[in-house]
Image (cartoon, rainbow, N blue to C red):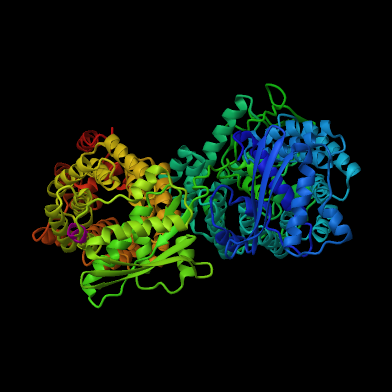
Amino acid sequence: MSNDAENEYFCDGLAEELLNALAKIDDLNVAARTSAFSFKGKGANVSEIGNALNVNTILEGSVRKSGNRLRITVQLVKASNGYHLWSERYDREMRDIFDVQDEITLAVVGALKVKLFGEERAAVLKRYTDNPQAYEFYLKGIYYRWKLTPEEFGKSLKYFEQATAADPNFALAYFGLASYYGYGTAWGLLPTPPEEGWAKAEAAMEKVLELDATLPEVLIGNAFKLVHYREWDEAGTGIERAAEANPKFPEIHHLYSFYLLAVGRFDDAVSEAKRALELDPLSLNYSRFLGICFFFARRHDEAIGQLNQALELEPNNPSVYEILGGVYVQKGMFAEAAAAWQRAMTLEGDDELAAVLDRDKDNFANAAQAIAQKRIERMNAKTASGEFVLAINLARAYLMLGDEDQTFYWLEKAVDERNVFPLLMNSDPFYDRVRSDSRFQDLLRRVGFPTDENAPGRTTNEASETQTARLSPAATEAKEFGVPPSGGNLNNQSTSSAGEKQPPEGGTPNFTSNIKRGYLITLVVFLLAAVGFGYWFLSAKKSDSSAGGKKSLAVLPFVNASQDANAEYLSDGITESIINNLSQLAGLKVMSRNSAFRFKNNQTDTKNIASQLGVESLVTGDIKQLGDKLIINVRLIDPSDDSQIWGNQYVKTTADVIAAQTEIAQAVAQNLRLRLTNSEQRQLGKSYTKNAEAYELYLRGRFHYFKITQAEIRKSIEFYEQAIELDPTYALAYAGIADAYRTLPIAYGTSSKESFPQAKAAAIKALEIDANLAEAHIVLGWIAFWFEWDWQAAESELKRAIELAPNNADAHRAYAHLLSNTGRHVEAIAESKLARELDPLSLITNSLEGQFLFYAGRELEAFARYHKTLEIEPNFWVAHNGLARIYIRQKRFAEAVTALNKAIELSGGSTEPITQLGYALAKSGNREKAQATLEELKSLAAESYVPAYNFAMVYNGLGEKEEALKYLEKSFEEREVQITFIKIDTRWDEFRAAPRFIEIIKRMNFE
C-alpha cells in the first residue's frame, strides 16, 4: 500500500517469510507460495480462495512503508464465511521487523490453537539474520528472482551481493547467490563461460554449508550440483533424503520427480510430481510437469488431460501448447499437433513460423521440416552476429530434418556444454528414432545413463512408427543447410584431426546473455522450465487485469408471486433495473442480466449459484401485485452459509414502483458497505422517467425483447413507442428502440438499410436527452462498426460506453467484436474475457469468445470454449455452428456436416448454418448437395430477406469465383453485417488478389 511501487518487494517478501515459517509446523498445512500468490491483486473473495487452495483459514494483510516506518495490518479470516479469527495492526520501525514477524507467527499459531514445543518452536522462530538492511536487500533479491523474466532475474544478483556484504553470515543470501549462478549457468542466461558460473555457484553453496547445513535449500542445491556432475546415484540419494526431511516442501518433490524422470523411473516420477502439485495446486510449473511425466511415460491420454488442466491455470502459456503438440505427434494426431504448435508460435509472437505451419498444415511432415530449416537459418544468422546458440537447439532441429550426422555432431556439443538441456535424452520420446544408434548409446554413457537400447523411453508403438515415417525422411546432405558435420560457420566448436575441439573460424565462442527462447524443435527447453528454477526463462510476468478489491454480486430474477402470469414482465423488469443501477458502481462487480437469469426458475442452491457466477453475495426477491399495490420482498444473502445479511419488504402503489427500485439498489449498496462517490450516489437515485405508466410499458418492451425472436423484438418496439408517447423525454425507451432495430439484421437477416438508420436515429435521440446513456453509445458503436464501417468512430463510441458503464458486459462484448473483425485479435480476446467475467453463463458471450479465438487461429481454445458453451446449454445452435467452422478448417467434413445439421434443426432453419452447410459440402467435393443448399436459400429468399453474403459464401466453396464476387459486391451495396468479416475470414484468401475484392476492402476502409 506504499505510495512507492518499488516497495512491493517488501510486501511480497514479508508474506513469503511468514509462509515459510508457518510451513515448518507439522500440524499445519500451509498453501505453497505459487498457489497463494496466484491470487495477488485479483480481489477474489475468501470463500473462493479457500475452495481453490483447499484451506479453511486465510491470513491476509497490508503493508505501508515510509522511510524506516512500517504499518503492518494483518487479519486471520475463516474462509467459509469471512469472519475474522484474529487481527492486529503493527506500527513499528524497520529495525523491529524481525520481532513483528515473530509476533504475527505466534499470534496465528495461537488463534489456530496449534501447540508448539521445543525444536519445532525454535525452527518456526529461527532468524537467519539480525541485520534489517541485509534482510531488506535479501527481500529485493527474492522479489526479482520471482519476477519470471531473464532481465528481472539478472537484477537479483546485485541485491544478494549487497545482502551478503551487509551480513557476511546470512546463509539464505548466499543461497540466493548460488541459485543465481547455478540456475543462470544451467540455462545459459549468464554473460560468462559455464565453467566460471558453476565455480561461483559452488563457492556460494560451500559458504551456505559452512553457515547453516540444515537449510532445505542446501539439500536442493547439493542435489542439483550432483546432477550437473552426472553423479546420478548420489544425486538421487540426496534428493530422496531432502524429500523425507521436508515432506511439505513442494520444490523438493518437484526436483525429485525430474530426477526420477531423467533416469527413467516413470511411475515414481508421476507420484512425486503429483505430490508437488498437491502441495501447490495452482502452480503452472507443477501442473505442466506432471503432464510431461505422463508424456514421457507414454501415458498419452493422461498427458493430454493434465496439460489441458495446466491451460486452465494459464490459458496463454506457449510452453504447454508446445508440449501438448508433442503428445499429439506421439499419438499420430497430426492435425491437433499442428494446431497446438501454431498456437504456441502465435503466443510467442513468431508469426513467421506460424505462417509456415499454416501454409503446410495439410502435410505435417513438410511443415515440421520447413520450420526446422527456418530455425537453422535463424541460428546461423545469430551466431554470425556473435550471439551464443545452444547446441541442443541445433541437434533437435537437425533430427527433425532427419540428418543424423548433424544431429549427433551437435548432441556431442550439447553434452560438452554441461547445461541442463541434454539431461532428459534418456527418457524423451523425441529421441526414440535414434535410440538404438551406437552414437546415442555412447552419449548416454557419457552422461551417466544406462546404455541399453531398450532403456527407458524405448517404444515401438504404431504412433511412434508413424511419427518416424512422417518426420524422418532420408538424411539430406548437410551442405544444403550450410553446416557440414566437420565444421561450419556456427559458433560452437569444430573438431580437429587430432580429435580436440577447437573454436570455429572467426574466434572463440561468444557467451552473450541475449539468448532467446527455444521453439518448436526445442521441447526440452520447456521440460526443464517446469522444474521451477527456470520458469522465468519461458514467460514474461502477466499483467493482472483483475479488478483488485471489488465486491461482487448477482441479482437473481425476482419471483412473480402474483396469480397473473402476465405480470412476469414486472418481476423481470424490476430485477433488470436493479442490476443496471448497481452496475454503475465502480467498487462493485455485478453479474449481467444474461447470466443471472439462467437461474430464473432454480434458486434453491445459493452456494452453487454463487460459485457458478463467481460472486460473494446474492440478491433475491419476489413481487406480488394486488390491484394497484405491489408487495416486494428483497433479501441480500451470503451464499457461503445461506445467511441473510439484510432484508426488507416494500409495499408500494404501482405509481411508486420507480422509487421502490431506487430504494432497493441504495439499500443493497449500503448493506454491502460500499463507499460511494457523490456522483455514484446521484446515479443510484436517478430515474429516467417519473411516469409510472411509461415505465411499465418500457418494462413490457424489455420483457418481449429478451424473448429473442423477430416477432417479439418487433413487439418490444411497439411498447417502447407507447412509453415515448407518454413521456417524450424517456431516454431509455429510445435506447430500447435503437437496440431492437440494431439486433434485427444480425439475428434475423433483415435488411441493414432498413434497420440500422432507424436504430441510429433512436440512439441519437436518446443521447440528446441523456448524453451519458451507455446503452445508446453501444448502439452507435455497433452501427459505426456494422453499417458505416467507420472503425475509429465505432471504437470511440464503445470505449465511451465502457467508461460510463464498466460493468456492462454488452459494451465489452461489442468492443471485442470490433477488435476481432479489424484483426486486433489479442485485444479482442482480452476484452472478450472481461465480458465473460461479467456474464459467465451467457451463451452468446461464451460463443463469441469461441468465434474470436477461431479467427485468431487459436482453434484448440475455440473448440474448448464452444464446448463450455454447450455445457451450459446443449441446444444452443450458435455453438454447434461454431464447432462446424473449426471442423471445416481442419477438413473434418463429416463432423462439420453433422454439427451443421444439428444447428439447422435447433435454430429452426436459420440461413446461417444452411450457408455453412453449403460451403462445407462444396469443399468436401459434394457439389450436388451444395447446389441443393443454394436452391434452398433462393427459396427462402422468395419469402424473406436472405443476405447476399450467404450466396457468396456457398459460391466461394464451389469455386465459382465470378458468382461469389457478384454476390459479395451485392452484399457490399446492401451494407450487410456479414461482410464485415471479410478482412479476417480465411475462406476469402483465394480472392484477396482479385481487383474487385481489393476494391471492396478499400471501400470498407480496411486499408
Q: Where in the figure is residue 957, as x and y percent of width and height?
A: 25, 52
Q: Quadrant of the N terminus?
A: top right
| Magenta-colored stretch includes residue 671 | no
Instruction: Give the camera-side residue of 276 and 915.
Output: 276
Q: Quadrant of the C terminus?
A: top left
Q: Where in the figure is residue 220, as x and y percent of width and height?
A: 79, 50
- In the rendered view, would you say 847 is above or below 419? below
Q: Quadrant of residue 769?
A: top left
Residue drawn at point x = 62 percent, y = 47 percent: 526
Q: Quadrant of residue 936?
A: bottom left
Q: Is residue 809 left or right of residue 36?
A: left
Q: Where in the figure is residue 548, as x and y percent of width and height?
A: 52, 47
Q: Quadrant of residue 64?
A: top right
Which residue is situated farthest in the left direction here? 942
Span highlighted in magenta in the image: 693-698
Q: Is residue 543 left or right of residue 433?
A: left
Q: Is residue 883 visible?
A: no
| Magenta-colored stretch includes residue 697 | yes
Q: Is residue 844 left or right of residue 302?
A: left
Q: Is residue 838 visible?
A: yes
Magenta-colored segment: predominant secondary structure: helix
Instruction: Give the camera-side residue of 831 and 998.
Output: 831
Q: Where in the figure is residue 310, as x and y percent of width and height?
A: 57, 56
